[in-house]
Image (spheres, rainbow, N blue to C red):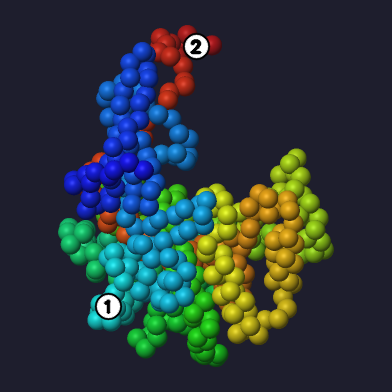
């Protein structure tokens, strides 16, 4: 690798470096030289920011699979090596040694909290756990069986109406905004679940941890008090940590794109929730359980479905295996598999029709050359869906759980985008393929 030259303007925000290497593009007989950017982990990119101005050309990249939209110092992901780091810390160390609140602090602030910082942050979470009473009335006016993600998005978007002062100096009060969002989204999610059952709301308790509080608000009952199981709490902590950020995915890019118009944090997060709602993004863990239900209801012959997955002419796809980014093991899947085994043992679940099918499919896939050669290993969605089912969380709440975990990453990216000295409002280009300019025809002459 050639010598590095630090680009001082970008250093604080982008953590990128301009290399001595250059890229050349030959267009219309002319040669254009473009800078090469090398990230702190060795990722390389051709800087095309001046391409259109110098050449009149733009690039086209459907799905942005080869386009870096920004520099970021939040999360590093290496799909070939199966590496995932938050702010330089390996996901394995964080999931096995930290609480979700610690990791949320890390993502938003850039460093792991001291004991004093963690205590202060936790106090803020407790302070903001309650919802404004007027917000609670909103739940009564959603139609029955409204999708929980729709409710979550609407409620988060409404926060800017209850806390308008937080939109005046958005980055200055990031501590308060992040704590308010992290605390209230947990309460909103639990309340929406309770309302869907027609059961009384359970208010947050100051004596419970973040995850224990959420579980209590979900499952406590006047006739059957909820007993906090620390193994379950530990598993939920891991689940939320593993979902806390994942680089420039669809929902995170949505938060950045919406926020680039200088939209407030609440509205930007609401947009991210809507993006996560998609079945190809946050809905994957729900799709795992639906697939297992389909297999069970059709007689439980999972081998037939594995054969269908191998058939190129069959539209069936095995959900929960492989990953668009990871070309080897998803590093999160090893962690969540262990947590899955622990929580099932702690809950005394030794047999469940869907869980039994899942275990059998996993065993076959891990030893079948067809899946191994294609790197179709179980991913985090496969195991998270099983854990949520074991905890009693219904299928339509799975994506809400994903949103709870992803919130710290969204906040961190929104803040990073807002602070970026190279900020520009997002405005992708296109290649127009429609009709060329044609004469207008009055309505009485049209055929």
Residue 427 location in percent, x, y?
Answer: 33, 36
State the residue position of label 1: 114
Residue 82 placement, left or right of 296: left
Residue situated in front as seen by the camera: 2 or 377: 2
User: Looking at the image, which residue is at 24% across and 69% down?
Assistant: 176
State the residue position of label 2: 446
Q: Give the quadrant of the C terminus.
A: top right
User: Looking at the image, which residue is at 33% across and 16% down?
Assistant: 30
User: Looking at the image, which residue is at 43% across and 30% down?
Assistant: 60
Residue situated in front as seen by the camera: 419 or 46: 46
- Asked if 121 appears above or below 246 in the picture, the reply is below
Q: Is mark 2 on a helix, strand or loop?
A: loop
Residue 11 location in percent, x, y?
Answer: 23, 50
Q: How crowded is mark 1: few (under 14 residues within 10 Å), some or many (20 or more)?
A: few
Residue 374 location in percent, x, y?
Answer: 66, 49
Quick one: which residue is furthest to the front in this view? 2
Q: Give the quadrant of the N terminus.
A: top left
């Amino acid at each position: 690798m050639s010598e590095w030259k630090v680009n001082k303007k970008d250093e604080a925000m982008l953590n990128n470096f301009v290399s001595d290497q250059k890229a050349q593009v030959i267009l219309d007989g002319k040669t254009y030289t473009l800078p090469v950017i090398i990230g702190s982990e060795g990722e390389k990119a051709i800087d095309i920011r001046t391409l259109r101005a110098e050449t009149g050309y733009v690039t086209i990249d459907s799905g942005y699979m080869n386009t870096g939209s920004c520099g970021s110092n939040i999360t590093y992901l290496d799909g070939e090596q199966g590496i995932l780091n938050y702010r330089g810390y390996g996901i394995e160390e964080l999931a096995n040694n930290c609480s979700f609140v610690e990791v949320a602090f890390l993502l938003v602030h850039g460093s792991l909290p001291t004991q004093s910082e963690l205590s202060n942050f936790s106090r803020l979470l407790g302070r903001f756990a309650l919802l404004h009473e007027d917000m609670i009335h909103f739940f009564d006016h959603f139609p029955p069986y409204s999708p929980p993600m729709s409710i979550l998005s609407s409620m988060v978007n409404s926060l800017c109406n209850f806390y308008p002062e937080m939109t005046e100096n958005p980055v200055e009060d990031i501590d308060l905004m992040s704590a308010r969002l992290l605390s209230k989204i947990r309460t909103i999610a639990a309340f929406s679940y309770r309302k869907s059952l027609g059961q009384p709301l359970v208010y947050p308790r100051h004596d419970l941890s973040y995850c224990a509080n959420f579980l209590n608000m979900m499952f406590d009952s006047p006739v059957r008090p909820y007993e906090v199981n620390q193994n379950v709490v530990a598993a939920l902590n891991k689940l939320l940590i593993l979902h806390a950020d994942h680089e420039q995915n669809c929902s995170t890019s949505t938060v950045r794109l919406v926020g680039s118009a200088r939209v407030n944090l609440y509205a930007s997060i609401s947009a991210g929730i809507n993006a996560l709602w998609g079945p190809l993004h946050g809905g994957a863990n729900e799709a795992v359980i639906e697939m297992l239900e389909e297999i069970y209801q059709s007689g439980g012959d999972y081998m037939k479905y594995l054969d269908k997955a191998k058939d190129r002419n069959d539209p069936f796809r095995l959900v929960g295996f492989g990953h668009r980014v990871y070309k080897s093991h998803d590093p999160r899947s090893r962690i969540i598999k262990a947590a899955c085994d622990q929580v099932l043992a702690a809950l005394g679940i030794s047999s469940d029709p869907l869980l039994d099918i899942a275990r059998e499919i996993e065993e076959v896939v891990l030893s079948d050359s067809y899946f191994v050669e294609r790197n179709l290993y179980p991913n985090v969605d496969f195991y998270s869906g099983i854990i949520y089912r074991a905890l009693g969380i219904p299928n339509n709440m799975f994506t809400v759980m994903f949103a709870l975990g992803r919130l710290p990453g969204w906040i961190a990216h929104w803040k990073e985008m807002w602070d970026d000295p190279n900020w520009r409002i997002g405005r992708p280009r296109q290649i127009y393929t429609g009709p060329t300019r044609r004469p207008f025809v009055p309505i009485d002459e049209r055929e």
